[in-house]
Amino acid sequence: MPNQQNGGWSVNPNVAADDRGNTKASINVEHKGQDHDFYAGWGKVIRGPNKAKPTWNVGGRFRW
């Protein structure tokens, strides 16, 4: 998979814990093209007192 500086796809998974006992999982996907960018993300507190429904986002940009 090409790195972000050279264009192409980038996938960034993450699992992190905080000092309040929450564990959050997230993943971000990006694609940088010559005339467009695309990004999407998903995250959820999977364990702990702030456990809730997942959050997500999707977006993009065209360069003219």
Image (cartoon, rainbow, N blue to C red):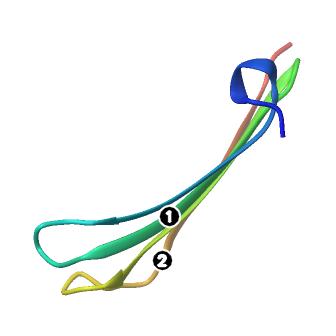
Up/down of 48 relative to 7, above or below:
below
Picture layout, residue 31 above or below residue 32: below
Q: Is residue 43 above or below residue 45?
A: above
| Mark sitting on residue 1 | none
Q: Is residue 23 left or right of residue 14?
A: left
| Mark 1 and mark 2: Cα distance apart in space | 9 Å
Left or right placement of residue 44 versus residue 52 in this view: right
Callout in the foreground (1, 2) = 1
Residue 61: give x, y in percent of width and height. Answer: 74, 30
Q: Secondary structure at mark 2?
A: loop
Hey, what amino acid is under mark 2? Pro
Question: Where residue 13 appears, x then y in whole percent?
Answer: 57, 58
Q: Residue furthest top?
A: 64
Residue labelled with disc 1: 26
Q: Please name whichever residue, 41 or 25, is drawn nearer the observer in this view of the structure.
A: 25
Q: Residue at x 17, y 78 (%)?
A: 21
For the point 88% across and 18% down, the residue is 34
The residue at the point 71 percent across, 19 percent down is: 5
- Could you say which disc has been placed on residue 54 in the image? 2
Q: Are marks 1 and 2 in contact (CB under 8 Å)?
A: no
Q: Is residue 6 left or right of residue 23?
A: right
As helix, strand or loop, the secondary structure at mark 1 comes to strand
Q: Position of residue 53 (x, y in %)?
A: 43, 84
Which comes sooner in the sequence, label 1 or label 2? 1
